[in-house]
Image: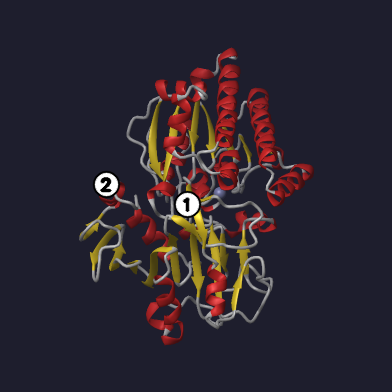
Amino acid sequence: MAVVIIVADGARPDTLVSAMERGIAPALSRLRDEGGMYTLTSVFPSVTGPAYAPFLMGRYPGPIGLPGLRWYDRARTTSRLPGNSRSYVGPDMRHVDSDLDRDAPTVFEMVPSSIAALNVIGRGLEPSARLGRGLGFIARTARTHFSGNVNGWLAIDRDIARELADRIRSARPDFAFAALSGIDKTSHSEGHSSTWVDKATQIVDWAVARIREDAERAHLWESMHIWVVSDHGHSPVAAHEDLAGLIRDMGYRTIAHPFVYSTRGEVAVMVSGNAMAHIYLNLAKRSRPWLADLGGRWAPIRDRLLARESVDLMILPVAPGACEVHGRARGHARMTWSHGLVSYEPFTGDPLGIGTQDRLDEMESYDVTLASDYPDSLVQISHLSDSQRSGEIILSASRNWDFRARYEPIPHASSHGALHRDHMLVPLLLSRPANTRPRRTVDVMPSALRALGVTPPKRLDGKSFL
Ligand SMILES: [Zn+2]
């Protein structure tokens, strides 16, 4: 068996359905008819980078070291430059592999016959197995990113799609993974319902059609799975909160990208996607302060933020296994978890809108939140709150808002990263039917291992749907 996974980065389920119904994605429609289409939940933060950990490691991103696209290294053990910050937008991308938990294997480490393109996580991948990794290509993606050139992204996707199909045909790898970022890039810049997104979707369709045609011609289609999946959704943004500026104006020495190389910061503002943020308080402290350790000096930040229209949810980690969840103008609830069982108790309010829940396992947590505005929120919040690298305040933005007003090379007409369903629900297309219902993006990697006959590692967050 061979498994090919194409990440249509940023595609929402309804966008793909619409493309299929309008007849502009015939190869994807064929997958849906023959294998099936499912809606999965992604992870929080719903942002490229962290949201790839499920596909390649079968794990939620926070506990394995990727709490966000940007994060602050309070322990100063990983990011040693002044400022101790990470941003995987740009050259820090090269650190992703070493930032990840060594004990959590990647699919590339378990399946030696692998190739990948724009995969973010690449530990275990041979240099010759990395598509589009030449210096010229990297310079081109950087130039395209910083110039905000929409056509440039589509040209990159076309090249990646062609290289992927060519390599699958010539090298016949067991596992192939490629991300096509055109849907995400054009959505940020032009809006998720723009015709640019159709053009990007057609490139995904072209790739599937070409790989299938080649496999059929070589009589290999019967022993191949092709899956098309996405890592996060998108929603329109009408207003940008300058989160870092807001806290700076309150009188705190604040570090935020791109100006992070200061050793005198008191507060770090690390935004992802741009609809989520980690805020790190009392940076002088090298071990993580919990809510009770923080003291009065930092309370005005929490109060001020909770009054902002841009803030939908505020998560305050209380201790390992406990947090408060505040909703702007909706009061707060307490969450606790241990041994995989999560409880949720409305206190002054019910910000997640799910009522009291007592000791739910991962499946029950999923079912109880799926129809809410925050699908899989109980599981996602518990894992992110416990991450050693998370902030003392974790924010999820209101609809129509994000958290970066300046220094963004691509205009953000649309954003993602938040916990609400527009960002958390993603499509999955399969070339042959699943045996059980796929639920979460973390199910993708265990399913690939099952298809390939590879023994899964001991610790995985997902379950095979095959
Ligand atoms: Zn994006």
Q: Quadrant of residue 435?
A: top left
Q: Is residue 150 above or below residue 368?
A: above
Dot 2: few (<14), some (14–19), or many (≥20) neighbours within 10 Å? some
Q: CA distance from mark 1 to mark 2?
A: 19 Å
Tell me, yes or no, whether the two marked residues, 1 and 2, touch with CB atoms within 8 Å.
Answer: no
Q: Is residue 249 above or below residue 448?
A: below
Q: Quadrant of residue 300?
A: bottom left
- The kind of residue on which mark 2 rests is Asp
Whole-percent x, y for residue 326 in the image: 34, 68
Residue appearing at x 57%, y 70% in the figure: 73
Residue 196: give its label. none
Q: Nearer the viewer, mark 1 or mark 2?
A: 1
- Locate the C terminus by quadrant: top left
Relative to 432, 137 lies left or right: right
Q: Is residue 158 above or below residue 68?
A: above
- Between 208 and 296, the one nearer to me in the picture: 296
- The kind of residue on which mark 1 rests is Ser
Residue 367: give its label. 2
Whole-percent x, y for residue 85 in the image: 62, 68
- Between 189 and 67, the one nearer to me in the picture: 189
Q: Earlier in the sequence, mark 1 or mark 2?
A: 1
> Which residue position is annotated with label 1?
46
